[in-house]
Image (spheres, rainbow, N blue to C red):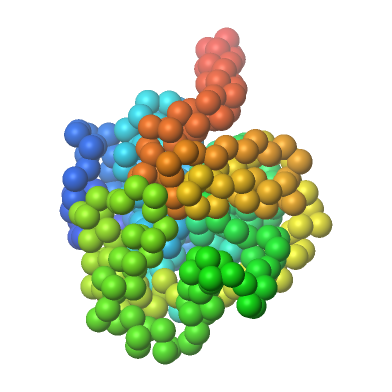
Amino acid sequence: MSPLPTHLCTHLPKPEGPGSVSQVPNLPARFAETFTSRYVDTGELRLHAVTGGEGPPLLLLAGRPQTWYAWRLLMPSLAQDFQVVAVDPRGVGLSDKPLDGYDTGTLARDMVALMDSLGHQHFAMVGHDVGMRTGYALAADHPDRLDRLVVAEAAIPGLSPSPPLFGSQEANDRLWRFAFNRLTDVNEQLVSGREHLYFGRQFATKSAKPLPDYAVQHYVDTLAADPEALRASFEFYRALDATIAQNQQRRTRRLSLPVLAIGGAENMGTSVSETMKLAADDVESLVLPECGHYPAEEVPEAMLAALTAFLAPYRHRQTASDILTVVRGAEG
């Protein structure tokens, strides 16, 4: 594994609290032998990332109300081919929780600054839910940084068609949280002390296969333990006006990089690829059977197979480039 830039290791403490590799439940065997929790100073804020593996860099970004932990079942296998960077974005887990900056333009800049700090100028990315919206912003705003993009299980405000106010009961059951989450103050007051009811229902109703109780408990406990974490979880939605305006500008600049759009058959299905085709020219669609909103945890084997196949050209090209660089260095 390539060494991290020296400045990352000299002035920041090692993350050891709840949410770090050392204090999350039921990790795959020998996980901590490969992966390390670390803080990364981006210059504007401090982010928590879990890193490990060999090969070209691969950024993993989950969505609300999850943390880096959502990728745990995929990370050991991915680390055989990639330098994996699974990150808590601003407002999440052990990362800083500023009052603002939750629009996807700022979230994308955070990810670019993170990868800069880790020494990665070019990388591939997998984004789920809010991570998908951030991935789209990153690809549009920083097209020279991403090689390939995988997105899963989200609509993109300002790009996806807006649903009607008086939709079907099914649509209301799926979408009511968007309006609720955008409220100011009253949603924290209503959810505080009832986090297990509110977020637990989300996990239960949006998954085709129940997530393990320990995983749901971990995600909800992370939010319930810190009022700032609960507040920040709503800020992604309160920033939607800014994100929508940004996406209306982004859609005028079509993406040229390869995109894999993944939907769960029991949740968003083909709508993920339909959304991305509004913005990108090279979109591959995949619908995962017996899967709801959380593919990395509901169907990890199928998700891993999809990522491995789609990212293979990126891995092979980067490996060949690294070998050529070494040969040229030896000849010089």
Q: Quadrant of the C terminus?
A: top right
Please name the residue shown 67% across and 52% down the image. Answer: 275
Please name the residue shown 48% across and 87% down the image. Answer: 184
User: Which residue occupies the extreme right position in the image?
Assistant: 252
Q: Is residue 219 left or right of residue 8?
A: left
Res 83 → quadrant: top left
Res 234 → quadrant: bottom left
Q: Quadrant of the N terminus?
A: top left
Q: Nearer the viewer, residue 165 or 69?
A: 165
In the image, is residue 156 above or below residue 73?
A: below
Res 205 → quadrant: bottom left
Residue 3 visible: no
Please name the residue shown 57% across and 18% down the image. Answer: 320
Q: Nearer the viewer, residue 329 or 106?
A: 106
Q: Is residue 93 left or right of residue 110?
A: left
Tally of numbered discs: 0
In the image, is residue 69 above or below residue 325?
A: below
Q: Residue 292 appears at what percent x and percent y?
A: 44, 50
Residue 283 visible: yes
Please name the residue shown 61% across and 46% down the image. Answer: 270
Q: Residue 229 appears at what percent x and percent y?
A: 34, 72
In the image, is residue 110 above or below residue 185?
A: above
Q: Residue 313 appears at what percent x and percent y?
A: 59, 24
User: Which residue occupies the extreme top position in the image?
Assistant: 331
